[in-house]
Image (tube, helix red, strand yellow):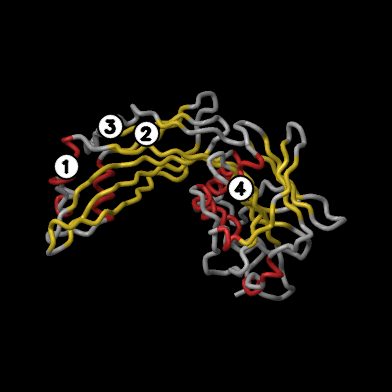
Amino acid sequence: MKISPFRLIMNGLRALFLSLLLGGCSTDFVLEAEWKDLPVAYGFLSLQDTAHYIRVEKAFLEPGGDATRIARIADSLYYDERTQVQLQRVSNGQTFTLQRVDGALEGYPRAEGVFATTPNILYKIKADDIRLREGETIRLRILRAEPAAPATAETTVLGEINPRETNPPSPMNFGYDRNVVFAWDAPIAARLFDLRLLLHYRESTPGAPGVFTSKTLIWVLNSEILRDNDQTPRVSHTIRGEELYRFLQASLEPVNDRIRILDRVDIQITGVGAELSEFLNIARANAGLTGSQAVPVFTNISGGRGVFSARTAAVRTGLTLNGASLDSLRNGVYTRNLNFQ
């Protein structure tokens, strides 16, 4: 099936947001256009990374052909060694040229799918070589053969996220009718957030009640939290306590031949820069029955396509449930058949 021009970019970016937000390297969607030298770039800078990777590929279209077939040809997908990818400090012009590497040899193999998996070309710089600073503006530059002008983009490096220990306090109260508030302080430049709980529990082995296996459930509370106040670092999200038990009911099968024990809960918060919040605003504006059928292409790459932004994350670990919430877990209407003890 032939893919129409730019048809997949919005759906691809929505999936891309989730993967890159959490530190992944998947950017597998096809972008095609009338042929010209059009780079497609993706990169998220983070002070928490030991190395920074940028993916740079070509947009392409064989006249009358199939872009998905061309995507499996590495020479059609990647630029050669003459192309340079640079990061530049806007404040003083200091420029760093990234190393062209095979991501598979760096521990980042490309998943099977539409695109060629070998090699998996990325552009890399070690964190110690560039030493990013919170709040500074970094420019991405993609330099190809003359006479093509550099493709460029800019983003602001994000500082730390600091979860508020009183929102929620531990042990947590997940009463059915209770509002549970999750709050954190984040740099103003962080505009879009993903909030999730990691529920760590043990499950006994049928026939061997003393043998337990440790397991983790990941509960995505909201992956599209937009900052609603640019004047304060505080960001928050509220849920009803009942939602916890509904999630567990939907995620675990009822059992009577084993027991489960909830050990702890971790709160994971990830934020990204304004570039992705702008994408989300476009996606929301064009969703639903009233949305435009001609979804605009989102990019913040001048002279190219893709997303260059920044990421920051924090995890608050070791939270527990209070006595009433544990009782609801054991005996409540949603979870009584899950055999938590």
* Residue type for callout 1: Ser
State left or right for residue 171 relative to residue 111: left
* Residue type for callout 3: Ser
State left or right for residue 199 relative to residue 119: left
How crowded pointer 1 is (Cα within 10 Å; few <14, some 14-19, many 20+) is rated as some
**Mark 3 highlights which residue?**
170
Task: Please tell me whether mark 4 sits on a helix, a strand or a loop.
Answer: strand
Q: Nearer the viewer, residue 294 or 217?
A: 217
Question: Looking at the image, is mark 1 or mark 4 nearer the viewer?
Answer: 4
Q: How far apart are labels 3 and 4 at the CA level? A: 35 Å
Q: Earlier in the sequence, mark 3 or mark 4?
A: 4
How crowded pointer 2 is (Cα within 10 Å; few <14, some 14-19, many 20+) is rated as many
Q: Quadrant of residue 162?
A: top left
Question: Looking at the image, is mark 3 or mark 4 nearer the viewer?
Answer: 4
**Mark 1 highlights which residue?**
328
Residue 39 is situated, as x and y percent measured from the top left of the image, at 72, 57
Residue 208 is situated, as x and y percent measured from the top left of the image, at 13, 61
Quadrant of the frame with the N terminus: bottom right
How crowded pointer 3 is (Cα within 10 Å; few <14, some 14-19, many 20+) is rated as some
Q: Earlier in the sequence, mark 3 or mark 1?
A: 3
Residue 266 vertical placement versus 250 (above, below): above
Q: Quadrant of residue 34?
A: bottom right
